[in-house]
Image (cartoon, helix red, strand yellow):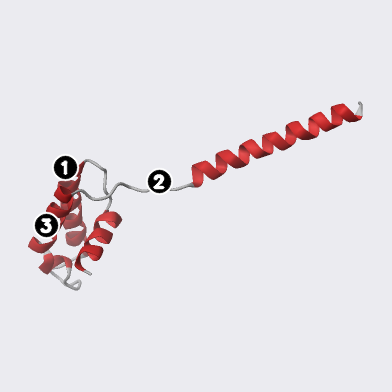
Amino acid sequence: MTSANVLCDVIEISLSFLAVAVVMASSSKRRRSSDFSPEETKILVECFVTNLDVLSAKHSITITNRRKKELYETIISKVNAVGGNGRGIESVKDKWVIKIC
């Protein structure tokens, strides 16, 4: 094997590693979700204000984690029905915190 062949093999291996690194780097980037539309924000505020007593209350016999989760799921479905962006519970909670602060 000549030195030129060895050099070609080294370059080929280096390019393979580089290609893998590029694929891994691009797949690990998190896509930013779109901003809440005015309609989504309006629905979010209306739902939170309507259910504020339950959502802001401490857990008790009548206010359970399951009840809060059900309310969040209802709010998420209403927000997603308007916007269609597939919002999750964390993005809805974060938006509410940002909106009231």
Residue at label 2? 31
**Circle 2 Cα neighbour tier, 10 Å, few/some/many (<14 / 14–19 / ≥20):** few
The residue at which mark 1 appears reads as 81
| 51 or 19: nearer the viewer | 19
Quadrant of image for the N terminus: top right
* CA gap, disc 3 and disc 2: 27 Å
The picture quadrant where one finds residue 70 is bottom left
Helix, strand or loop at mark 2 = loop
Residue 26: give x, y in percent of width and height. 52, 42
Amino acid type of the residue tagged 1 in the rendering? Ala
At a point 10% along the width and 63% down the height, the residue shown is 49
Examine the image and state in which quarter residue 63 appears. Answer: bottom left
Who is closer to the viewer here, 11 or 1?
A: 11
Q: Is 74 displayed left or right of 94 in the figure?
A: left
* Residue located beneath label 3 in the image: 47
User: How many residues crowd around disc 3 within 10 Å: few (fewer than 14), some, or many (20 or more)?
Assistant: some
Disc 2 or 1, which lies upstream in sequence? 2
Q: Nearer the viewer, mark 2 or mark 1?
A: 2
- Where is residue 21? Give x, y as percent: 61, 42
> Are the residues tagged 3 and 1 within 8 Å (C-beta)?
no
In percent of the image, x 80 and y 30: which residue is there? 9
- Secondary-structure class at tag 1: helix
